[in-house]
């Protein structure tokens, strides 16, 4: 159980990538009133939690409805996570996030009297509950063989999301503490870890398919 919790916790931390998301949230809410920043932080995490919970509960049904085997999804999910890991290592993921942030900031500059609602897009989706996090959720929930194991997986992702909420609420001091260089370094290290985890998912999927065949 401890091994499952540790694996899920690390994988969700890497997939959601709080060090990479925090600077984006800071940029999108720069200059906003504290009340608006607090509201966006809470709503972003709540909406992302709902999305991930939906896939956690309905992921198995979706796979069965589409006649997709667990091994096929495990291998495909591993490929998706591996591609995301490469983007993290080479900072492509960060660049894409920053471009989205710049677009929204540019739209705000044309209407400075109004602060945009960034809770749904881009913070909840795809920053927090992106393809990587959704695939990770479905992979772990599909592998869970009991309600206890499913509860452990949900507890792991809940801890990461609560951590994101705390970081968002304390975004000013957090950004001063880690800085852009440190955030970039952490993201690259997490990318290497995610690549290894993704490779394991791919190997397990191929092994299961060959043994099943």
Image (cartoon, helix red, strand yellow):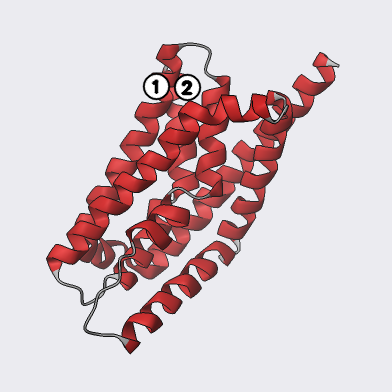
Q: Is residue 129 left or right of residue 163?
A: right
- Residue 39 — which label? none
Residue drawn where x is 39% and y is 28% of the image: 154
Q: Residue at position x 25%, y 85% from top?
A: 112
**Other-residue count near label 2 (Cα within 10 Å), few / some / many at <14 / 14–19 / ≥20:** some
Q: Residues within 10 Å of mark 1 (few under 14, many from 20)?
A: many
Asked whether residue 8 is in view, the answer is: yes
Residue 152, quarter of the rendered image: top left
Q: With 95 as the anchor, is 5 left or right in this view?
A: left
Q: Is residue 184 above or below residue 131?
A: below
Q: Is residue 204 above or below residue 158?
A: above
Residue situated in front as seen by the camera: 190 or 79: 79
Considering only vertical position in the picture, is 201 above or below 211?
below
Going by the picture, which residue comes out furthest to the bottom?
Answer: 110
Disc 1: which residue? 152
Quarter of image, res 96: bottom right
Residue 167 in sight: no
Q: Which residue is mark 2?
A: 4
Where's residue 199, x and y in %?
A: 68, 38
Q: Nearer the viewer, residue 24 or 57?
A: 57
Q: x%, y% of residue 52?
A: 44, 38
- Contact check, label 2 and label 1, Cβ < 8 Å: yes
Q: Taking 37 as reference, is 111 left or right?
A: right
Name the quarter where the C terminus is drawn: top right
Q: Residue at x 38, y 20 (%)?
A: 151
Residue 44: x and y, percent?
32, 53
The residue lying at 58 percent from left, 48 percent from top is 192
- Give me the C-alpha separation between circle 2 and circle 1: 7 Å
Q: Identify the secondary structure beneath mark 2.
A: helix
């Amino acid at each position: 159980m401890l091994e499952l919790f540790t694996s899920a916790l690390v994988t969700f931390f890497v997939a959601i990538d709080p060090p990479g998301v925090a600077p984006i949230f800071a940029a999108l809410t720069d200059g906003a009133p504290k009340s608006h920043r607090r509201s966006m932080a809470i709503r972003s995490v709540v909406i992302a939690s709902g999305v991930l919970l939906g896939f956690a509960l309905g992921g198995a049904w979706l796979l069965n409805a589409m006649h997709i085997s667990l091994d096929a999804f495990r291998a495909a999910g591993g490929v998706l996570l591996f591609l995301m890991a490469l983007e993290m290592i080479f900072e492509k993921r960060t660049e894409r996030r920053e471009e989205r942030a710049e677009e929204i900031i540019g739209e705000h500059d044309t209407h400075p009297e109004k602060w945009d609602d960034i809770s749904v897009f881009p913070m909840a989706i795809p920053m927090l509950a992106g393809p990587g996090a959704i695939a990770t959720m479905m992979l772990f929930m599909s592998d869970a063989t009991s309600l206890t194991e499913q509860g452990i997986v949900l507890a792991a992702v809940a801890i990461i999301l609560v951590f994101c909420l705390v970081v968002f609420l304390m975004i000013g001091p957090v950004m001063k503490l880690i800085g852009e260089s440190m955030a970039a370094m952490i993201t690259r290290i997490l990318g290497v870890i995610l690549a290894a985890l993704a490779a394991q998912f791919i190997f397990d999927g191929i092994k299961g398919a060959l043994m099943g065949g």
